[in-house]
């Protein structure tokens, strides 16, 4: 046995029984972080109870007695979101990681760090960072166990909160170590960055280190290093770090797609079921769409995933998708005095006499207060299998067949409810030019429309020009290319009123989209400069509470679009410059041409 472990108490599991490569990884990180204890996670219920007991004792979580097996954690108010400015991709050459912007332009498509600077950053943070704490080692699988599309990861962390959440968000435990054998895995190191004894008192008992927070990815070697934050997006490394950033780098090498997309199955009244994926920037209600309750009779929407899709063409040329995750990490609530949860909009449903405690701990928070009860980025974490509308095929190792890809954004003006791209290349252009009113899930504020190519801007791990190229290269003879659409639930009239009721009524748009994918003989679309748009009356509007103004929903104001095209061209050429595939320049030219003739 290695000397290193003699000085450290292994409180659970046996380091000797670990696969050789896992042991080498553990050894390296033990030497670096110097924990006092080691715990090899087995993923059992008993272990989970132990994690929750530890978190209760540390007063990090409290139970919510109104529900079974449900706990609430309040974080340090400084640790509530992903931190894009502190998220880095490290590669030998800068241009591998980020596109070279035009001279004098600040790049917005990711932060690069040189291997030397990364080493310095690591040495400034990790040595001794787990002193006095337990290092947990957890083996996990992204994707259904046994699926050829799944991938393994190992995360070491000093947070019991992370262990408990990773057990929900991934397939985690001993069965994964057994299945992995001496196979490959993504190496993930996480520390909250608060060695014991503490140098500063904790805020709300939540260990974190906001000053030194930093998340780095070595895409060439499948490694993630995250320091200083316990917030899910920064600490549950299977999700954004592995499934999107490392995942898309692997996908590029291996010829598949790792995308920031929900996956749903839609069944129509004839019983025909089709699957689609959709990408939206933050604050567009992606999880709401993934868990849609259809208002049209006879339609059913079932959820495969709400955040990430791993997609590959099979040997028959059919695109198939898996959800690499095992849980949902959704936006939610504040606590009520009866041990339940509350979120903005549920004021009317509060039982008599029940009061709300805000996320900052103020009791008797009142609806209508000048600040919200829940932090706008507060989250729940729950197993996907518990979703009432989970798709029966959600864990199919082969993945589900995908017929349509939807992009979308929150666009108050100019962009119609739905349109279909003219072909694959035009669809890639539609994805590359996604924009949306700004987000609160990251550190931005305000309401300007921001570009978010493929809704993946915060998750890009290689040059955006190469990313677009990779999408273009998906099209090959013998492949049945899915149709690509764009939707906008958020168009407003001149008085600021939403033109589309949204939510469950969006099934009407999904129905139109899937009819377009079914070679239906009915002629339901017509050509426009931006692509195919629905023929008037071709979207089922039966039973809508209020009539919709078709003309305003589908109008293509020429002045808006001329400005939009200038804006798109400037953004793509400013940001991606020499690395922009010429196909995108061609698409802008063709779009201008089509508007000229319009
Ligand atoms: O999630 C939303 N979706 C997708 C649902 C499947 N939201 C909420 C966004 C915040 C995350 C929406 N908000 C949607 C939508 O389709 N549409 C809107 C805008 C809207 C808001 C309120 C109304 C209508 C539209 N109310 C009435 O029409 C009465
Ligand atoms: Mn997401």
Image (tube, helix red, strand yellow):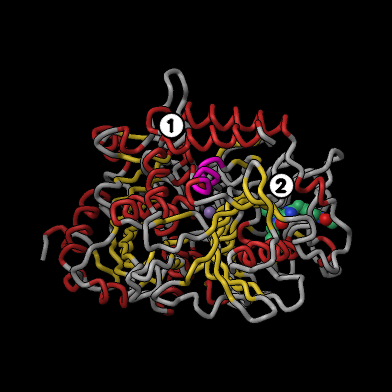
Circles 1 and 2, Cβ within 8 Å, touching? The answer is no
> What is the magenta range?
426-433
Based on the picture, tell me whether residue 597 belongs to the magenta stretch.
Answer: no
The reply, left or right, for residue 563 in relation to residue 16 is: right
Residue on which the image places disc 2: 416
Q: Which residue occupies 25% across, 67% down?
A: 10
The reply, left or right, for residue 289 in relation to residue 326 is: right
Q: Locate the C terminus and report the quarter of the image it occupies.
A: top right
Q: Is residue 379 visible?
A: yes
Residue on which the image places disc 1: 576
Estimate the x, y position of residue 295 in percent, counting from the top left. 76, 70
The reply, left or right, for residue 21 in relation to residue 54 is: left
Based on the picture, tell me whether residue 431 belongs to the magenta stretch.
Answer: yes
Q: Quadrant of residue 2?
A: bottom left
**As rendered, which of 561 and 492 lies closer to the eye?**
561
Pick out the residue farthest to the right: 546
Q: Which residue occupies 41% across, 56% down?
A: 258
Closer to the eye: label 1 or 2: 2
- Marks 1/2: CA distance? 27 Å
């Amino acid at each position: 046995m290695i000397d290193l472990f003699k000085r450290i108490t292994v409180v659970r599991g046996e380091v000797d029984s670990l696969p050789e490569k896992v042991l080498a990884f553990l050894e390296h990180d033990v030497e670096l972080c110097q924990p006092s204890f080691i715990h090899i996670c087995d993923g059992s219920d008993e272990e989970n109870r132990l994690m929750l007991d530890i978190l209760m004792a540390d007063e990090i979580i409290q139970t919510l007695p109104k529900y079974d097996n449900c706990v609430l954690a309040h974080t340090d108010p400084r640790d509530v979101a992903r931190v894009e400015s502190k998220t880095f991709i490290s590669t030998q050459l800068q241009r591998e990681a980020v596109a070279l912007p035009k001279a004098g332009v600040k790049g917005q498509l990711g932060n690069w760090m040189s291997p030397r600077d990364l080493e310095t950053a690591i040495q400034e943070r990790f040595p001794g960072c787990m002193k006095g704490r337990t290092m947990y080692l957890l083996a996990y699988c992204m994707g259904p166990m046994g699926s050829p599309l799944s991938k393994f990861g190992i995360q070491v962390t000093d947070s019991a909160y992370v262990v408990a959440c990773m057990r929900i968000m991934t397939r985690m435990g001993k069965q994964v170590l057994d299945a992995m054998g001496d196979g490959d895995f993504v190496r993930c190191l996480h520390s909250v960055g608060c060695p014991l004894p503490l140098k500063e008192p904790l805020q709300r008992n939540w260990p974190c280190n906001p000053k030194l927070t930093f998340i780095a990815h070595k895409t060439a070697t499948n490694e993630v290093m995250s320091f200083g934050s316990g917030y899910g997006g920064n600490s549950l490394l299977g999700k954004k770090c592995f499934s999107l950033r490392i995942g898309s780098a692997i996908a590029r090498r291996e010829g598949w797609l790792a995308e920031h997309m929900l996956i749903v199955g839609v069944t129509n009244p004839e019983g025909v079921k089709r699957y689609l994926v959709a990408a939206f920037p933050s604050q567009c209600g992606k999880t709401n769409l993934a868990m849609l309750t259809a208002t049209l009779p006879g339609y059913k929407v079932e959820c495969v995933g709400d955040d990430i899709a791993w997609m590959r063409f099979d040997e028959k040329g059919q695109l198939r998708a898996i959800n690499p995750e095992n849980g949902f990490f959704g936006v939610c609530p504040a606590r009520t005095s009866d041990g339940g949860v509350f979120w903005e909009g549920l004021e009317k449903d509060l039982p008599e006499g029940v009061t709300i405690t805000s996320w900052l701990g103020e009791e008797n928070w009142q609806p209508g207060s000048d600040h919200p009860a829940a932090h706008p980025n507060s989250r729940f974490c729950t197993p996907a299998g518990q979703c009432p509308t989970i798709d029966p095929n959600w864990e199919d190792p082969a993945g589900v067949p995908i017929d349509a890809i939807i992009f979308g954004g929150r666009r108050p003006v100019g962009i119609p409810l739905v349109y279909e791209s003219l072909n694959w290349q035009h669809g890639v252009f539609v994805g590359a030019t996604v924009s949306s009113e700004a987000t609160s899930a990251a550190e931005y504020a305000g309401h300007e429309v921001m570009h978010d190519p493929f809704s993946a801007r915060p998750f890009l791990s290689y040059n955006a020009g190469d990313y677009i190229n990779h999408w273009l290269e998906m099209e090959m003879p013998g492949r049945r290319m899915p149709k690509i659409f764009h939707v906008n639930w958020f168009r407003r009239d001149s008085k600021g009123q939403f033109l589309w009721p949204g939510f469950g009524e969006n099934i009407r748009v999904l129905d139109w989209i899937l009819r377009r994918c079914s070679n239906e003989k009915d002629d339901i679309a017509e050509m426009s400069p931006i692509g195919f748009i629905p023929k008037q009356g071709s979207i089922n509007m039966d039973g809508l509470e209020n009539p919709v103004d078709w003309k305003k929903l589908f109008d293509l104001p020429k002045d808006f679009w001329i400005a939009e095209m200038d804006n798109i061209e400037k953004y793509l050429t400013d940001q991606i410059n020499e690395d922009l595939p010429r196909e995108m320049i061609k698409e802008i030219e063709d779009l201008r041409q089509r508007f000229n003739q319009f």
